Image (cartoon, helix red, strand yellow):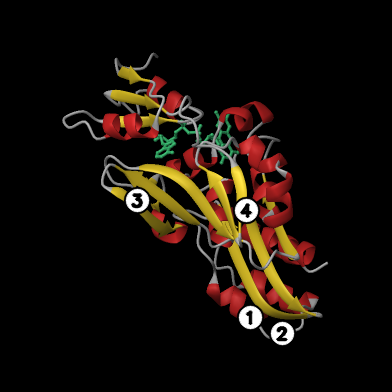
């Protein structure tokens, strides 16, 4: 099947893109890497009247640290997030999560902003962003607003983005670089979407857990921390028994518990 007819604009400035997205009476959609949107259009599951191509807009991509904040432009390719020495140094969990997405050809085109805006509950970047306490910057002709990613992600394929808004940047506080973290997932074949997985961050004082963050992947709905499992670890020595209890508290499928156990063992090393 081919996509339904649509108009196409390729702006060369953010202002032009925002004005195109603000056009009334037409359902417009930003086009980033096209790795999710184009297949959906080909299947006619998405029928935008206007595609606003973000690929020629300068300044929408790039990775930098400013003080204790890591800034990643929405159009930064997933492959660049994976390989960036800056991301590897300051938010290694995100870099590892990106490495699990599809195949290299997908990651070369797919963007961090596109993955968040698409909000697939099995996608790696949203789960990693929740585990890292990330924020997203939404820009429109009305101005800019900054939302915690937990408020941005509303449901499977659903976000808090409003008409005329673009996701322009992802921000992560990297004041306390992770020493203990893991991102693990299970796929049936290499490159497939994950059937289950877990993102884990631990702050340890010796072998005692002072803070735990556990986010299951592909658990349905939006990725979210599992406080019941985290609380079983906090203040406790990280023993195999404690890990077992936390994994059992995941309140999801057995595979999620197995992935959580693996991630906690890896993070605790
Ligand atoms: C074979 C295959 C395997 C894949 N495997 C995986 C996988 O294992 N894990 C995974 O996570 N993903 C996987 N993907 C999806 C891939 O990661 C996509 O890159 C991602 O879902 C969307 O990013 P994109 O930049 O391609 O966005 P697009 O496809 O261009 O856009 C996706 C949606 O987001 C909107 N959008 C894009 N950018 C913005 C923005 N800046 N502001 C507001 N809205 C925006 C678009 O309008 C559209 O609705 C796979 C894709 C394919 C084709």
Element type at mark 3: strand
Image location (x, y in percent) of residue 189: 69, 36
User: Within 10 angstroms of label 4, few (less than 14), some, or many (20 or more) residues?
Assistant: some
Alpha carbons under labels 1 and 3: distance apart: 39 Å
Image location (x, y in percent) of residue 18: 31, 35
The residue that disc 2 covers is 236
Instruction: Mark yes or no: residue 194 visible.
Output: no
- 4 and 2 marks in contact (CB < 8 Å): no
CB of residue at label 4: within 8 Å of ligand 1? no
Image location (x, y in percent) of residue 82: 68, 42
Alpha carbons under labels 2 and 1: distance apart: 8 Å
The residue that disc 3 covers is 144
User: Within 10 angstroms of label 1, few (less than 14), some, or many (20 or more) residues?
Assistant: some
Residue name at image x 71 percent, y 54 percent: 92
Looking at the picture, does residue 164 appear above or below residue 178? above
Alpha carbons under labels 4 and 1: distance apart: 34 Å
Q: Nearer the viewer, mark 4 or mark 1?
A: 4
Mark before the other along the chain sequence, 3 or 2: 3
Alpha carbons under labels 3 and 4: distance apart: 20 Å
For the C terminus, the quadrant is bottom right
Residue name at image x 16 percent, y 30 percent: 25
- 2 and 1 marks in contact (CB < 8 Å): yes
The residue that disc 4 covers is 65
Q: Nearer the viewer, mark 4 or mark 2?
A: 4
The residue that disc 1 covers is 232
Looking at the picture, does residue 55 appear above or below residue 126? above
Q: Nearer the viewer, mark 3 or mark 2?
A: 3
């Amino acid at each position: 099947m081919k996509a339904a007819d649509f108009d196409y604009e390729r702006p060369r400035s953010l202002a032009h893109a925002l004005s195109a997205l603000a056009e009334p009476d037409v359902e417009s959609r930003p086009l980033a890497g096209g790795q999710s949107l184009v297949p959906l259009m080909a299947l006619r599951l998405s029928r935008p009247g206007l595609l606003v191509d973000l690929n020629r807009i300068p300044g929408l991509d790039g990775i930098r640290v400013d003080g204790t904040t890591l800034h990643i432009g929405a159009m930064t390719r997933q492959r660049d997030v994976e390989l960036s020495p800056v991301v590897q140094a300051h938010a290694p969990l995100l870099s590892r999560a990106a490495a699990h997405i599809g195949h290299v050809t997908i990651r070369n085109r797919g963007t961090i902003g596109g993955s968040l805006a698409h909000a697939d509950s099995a996608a790696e970047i949203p789960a990693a962003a929740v585990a890292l306490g990330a924020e997203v910057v939404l820009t429109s002709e009305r101005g800019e607003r900054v939302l915690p990613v937990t408020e941005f992600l509303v449901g499977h394929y659903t976000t808090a983005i409003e008409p005329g808004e673009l996701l322009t940047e992802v921000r992560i506080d990297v004041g306390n670089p992770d020493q203990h973290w893991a991102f693990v997932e299970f796929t049936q074949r290499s490159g497939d979407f994950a059937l289950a997985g877990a993102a884990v961050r631990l702050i340890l004082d010796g072998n005692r857990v002072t803070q735990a963050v556990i986010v299951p992947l592909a658990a349905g709905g939006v990725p979210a921390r599992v406080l019941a499992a985290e609380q079983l670890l906090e203040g406790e020595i990280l023993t195999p028994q404690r890990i077992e209890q936390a994994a059992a508290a995941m309140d999801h499928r057995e595979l999620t518990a197995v992935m959580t156990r693996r991630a906690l063992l890896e993070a605790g090393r």
